[in-house]
Amino acid sequence: MAAGAGRARLIPMFRTQLETFSDKRVAQSMAAQSSQAPPSQRSTLTTAGRVVRRLASFVGWLLGGFGLVKSVRNHFRAGGAMHGAGGDEIVVYCVHRSFFLWALILTGFIGAASVRHWPGSAGAWGWIYTLVLIYTLLTLLFDVGSLKALLWGGIFCFVWLGSLYLEDLKHVTALSGVGRYLGHLHPSLDPGFAAVVSWLLLIPWLGAMFHSFSRGRKTFSPNSIEEWYLGEGREITDRSGLKFRSRYRDLFETTLGFGAGDLEAVDGNHHVVKRWENILFLALLWKRLDLILHQRAAVVDMESKPSEPGARAV
């Protein structure tokens, strides 16, 4: 009976060792087959894997608010302190001007769906689509800064008050006639037209967003500025002797870009060495970016202090 029990224990052990040995042989044979694959096939598989990973990263970047969610997560990971993963650097993205088409594309899709379900809202959506279209065109065609916006706002108010004076006291039709004429046009949104325009604009918009994702990434750290370009490599700029200033040259772009603006690097002679345009969320991220840009001065001061007496070089 003891011999039978010993054989009963040995059989499962032998079976386990045999299965382990067979699994190792299968893994080794698969590795050998992959290593024996032609170089062209291996390079093709490697390239395909990189493309898939890059597309997955791009989709995550879009769904993550164009990098804003990741930046905020890195900022609050250590309780808002400038430590931890991503605490001593910040990543921003410069976007193509076609980014500002997002409002027109989104309005077209929402308006088309609403008019299909509620046909009576075609008139209201016609005015909304017209206003968004005009705003988008003004954003792409003109740069309206703060002073220009105040100037044109003052001119419009003066014309409006003058129109009220002429109509109330002189009984002369002015702006009210223009308003009645536009109202009689009865613009209405055609759902098919709006959907087609949005789909046709969405395709180049996604291409421009991939261009911004692959070539518009800028990483600011206390010592350098790193720029990454897909297919070309990286460019690192030393921050020594440079000052930085933000510029919001277009209020329309700042609104559609969620606080977008430009960042300029200025040397000691007050010459603009480099300019990064259309940085998304610059107004929202400026406080943290400003802390990183001022961090180098503290680092340089610590390194420039003379060593204490009696200290020995390592």
Image (cartoon, grey):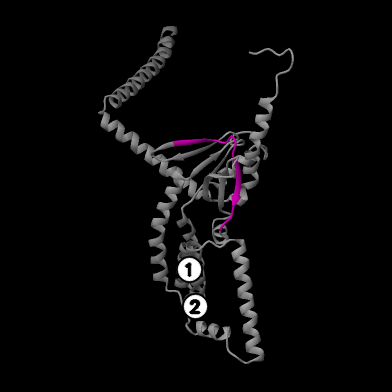
Who's the residue at 55% across and 86% down the image? 177
Q: Is residue 204 left or right of residue 123?
A: left
- What are the residue bounds of the magenta stretch? 234-249
Where disc 2 sits, the SS reads helix
55 or 299, nearer to the observer: 299
Give the labeled residue for mark 2.
123
Give the labeled residue for mark 1.
133
- On the image, the x and y values in percent for residue 21 come to 36, 17
Q: Nearer the viewer, mark 1 or mark 2?
A: 1
Question: Which quadrant holds the N terminus?
Answer: top left
Disc on res. 99: none
Q: Real-space Cα distance between discs 1 and 2?
A: 15 Å
69 or 258, nearer to the observer: 258
- On the image, the x and y values in percent for residue 306 come to 70, 21
Amino acid marked by disc 2: Gly
In which quarter of the view is residue 192 placed?
bottom left
User: Quick check: 75 above or below 205?
Assistant: above
Question: Which quadrant holds the C terminus?
Answer: top right
Q: Is residue 181 left or right of residue 29?
A: right
Who's the residue at 34% across and 34% down the image? 46
Verify whether residue 3 appears in magenta.
no
For the stretch drawn in magenta, the main secondary structure is strand
42 or 243, nearer to the observer: 243
User: Quick check: 68 above or below 10?
Assistant: below
Amino acid marked by disc 1: Leu
In which quarter of the view is residue 38 placed?
top left
Q: Residues within 10 Å of mark 1 (few under 14, many from 20)?
A: some
In the image as oriented, which residue stretches furthest toward the front? 269
